Amino acid sequence: MRGLCAVYRKELCDHFSSYRFIVLFALIAMVSFITSYMAGMHLRENLGGLSRTKFPFLMLFSTPGALFSMVQFVAFFGPLIGLVLGFDSINRERAHGTLIKLISQPIYRDAVINGKFLAAVATISIMLISIVLVISGFGLAIVGVVPGIDEIWRLLIYLVISIFYISFWLGVSMLFSIFFRNIATSALASVALWIFLSFFVSLGADVVANAVAPVGNQREIRPENARVKDMVSLCSPMVLYSNATATIIDPMRKTTRSITLMGPAEQILASRFQNPLRLGQSVIVVFPYMTALIALTLVCFAISYFVFMLQEIRT
Amino acid sequence: MIHVENLTKYYHDLCAVDTINLEIEKGEVLGLLGPNGAGKTTTLRMLTGFLRPSSGTIRVKDYTIEEDALKIKRLLGYLPESAPLYHEMLVYDYLVYIANIKGLEKTGNGKLSQIRNLADLCGLNEVMHKPIGELSKGYKQRVGLAHAMMNDPEILVLDEPTSGLDPNQIAEIRQIIRRIGKEKTIIISTHILSEAEAACDRIVIINRGKIVADDRTESLKQTASKEHFIHVSIRNADFQSARAQLEVIDGISKVECIQEDQDGMIDIRLTCNASFDLRGPVYQTVKKTDWALMELHQETRTLENIFRELTKEE
């Protein structure tokens, strides 16, 4: 435990004093501010005359400003934070020879990888929480509506999911930094995997869906095609994250599916009951995606842990 | 203090350390000598519990490396080759970090007083608040030494502590090692013979993973000085007749042909174990023949000769 704490504190200090972290943090904070400001202004204009607007505070995070909302921005570019914090965590120490020195100290070997991972997760958490808090304060001034308890809980759950999502990418980059001795190789491999899983999987999902259940023309909708597409898309952590946060941050959304088949009676019911989902119901809807995302993060770290523990470090 | 038995290490098919047996007493300063790639660093890394041996046992005090690696690490201070450090950290911050890792207490005779003592011992006071990356190699090595001694270990393992330093820095580091050596068991790996000769009580020479010599420094020096060589270059002679004439001289134990030119020049090495100078009798023997004596000189055997003989490539 002593070794773990020492490594954790040193790593945390290194992250907060590193230029790459400061630059990335400034960039993400700036984009989040701009997005939230534009969303706030948009909300103020459009909701001005309405008496009972539902969850206006959460809309700060889910309403697209100019191009995308803050939630979409984290889904797309949040992984970069994880990758930047982890791509050289082990191989840099190995290249500088400090890993030998660290491991020959009277500490357990896993204290090194655990300390590094926990410090990076703490950095991610502090970063996300501070951005969300500052945007919330900013939003209060623009929108002028105080968030309710339900909204605060939703924001907390959203933060936890986001931390796990970014930590998954942190785990991936740490795994590559253990596998590859060269820092540039591990960085490239991490970015390549991020691009593939975030952007190409949805393209691949279309191809697979059309191969399994071809659609005759553009207007035709085949449930089988949509189902296959949804299933294949779930290979992407970004899709998992989007689905996991979907009904949490936007309570008016009642499902994560792209197509919902309803009978005539159900359609009448749905049109009559336009109320938002309660927090518990929202959690139930996204629960499978949340657990999948958490499991992915833990599995990724577990692989890194075992590879690191079994690896013979000679240099 | 340290008991090593049949220690072997394979890197895939390559045998880096081959069935090494060692016994190191408390307070001894042991020099581990050998050419590059001989297996010195691998041996030290196994001793420090950093590398797992393929077979064999290492026992430090009552602990074995398989079962009590952490306890052994607490008894050891290790300075790896070229003293790897975090260059962006300040010297003070680095030493505090190491003190935290080694579990030194914050108060009393703990962390801060130990850092102060080590700064005095290693001469680090004036650079305590400088980034490590800005220090000279000598100072970096001192920081590495302070690191190794942070938990006041009973055993210090130093892997080529003066490698890459200038003569002044080498002298400074040796002085520090000598100061520490009065109280602790030290194992120094080096390929600089003068360093081992000056600092070590005992020398172990390793070649291709095997121990080829293990003796007290003094007795190795005595063995070296007992034997010396005489080099003779003669013309108009054949080796067989020269050998017949020279090997009968009292005190010459071996006659070897080093080189035989086509123009009739022979270079001969005579191994002498006599305590007196044999150049006179050799000259007298050559004078009686019709050979032309081109060169005659004596070479005293040193530790370096022993090292080169034991570690030369076949």
Image (spheres, grey):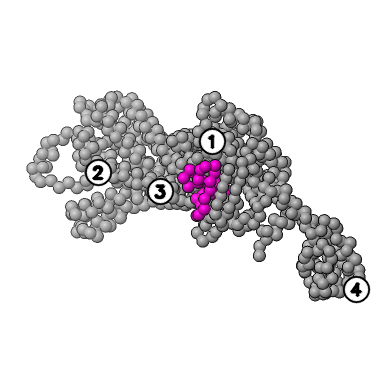
Mark 4 residue type: Asp
**Residue occupying the point 56% across, 40% down:** B76
**Can you give x and y, in whole percent of width and height, for residue A145 in the image?**
28, 25
User: Marks 1/3: CA distance?
Assistant: 25 Å
User: Would you name the residue on which mark 3 appears?
Assistant: A306
Tell me which segment is drawn in magenta: B44-69
Using the rendered image of the protein, determine whether residue B295 is visible from the camera's viewpoint: no
**Residue occupying the point 89% across, 70% down:** B292
User: Would you name the residue on which mark 2 appears?
Assistant: A288
Mark 3 residue type: Phe
Q: Residues within 10 Å of mark 3 (few under 14, many from 20)?
A: few
> Foreground residue, A49 or B47?
B47
Query: Which mark lies nearer to you, 2 or 3?
Result: 3
Q: Chain of mark 2?
A: A
> Foreground residue, A116 or A260?
A116
Where does the N terminus of chain B fall, quadrant-wise?
top right
Q: Residues within 10 Å of mark 1 (few under 14, many from 20)?
A: many
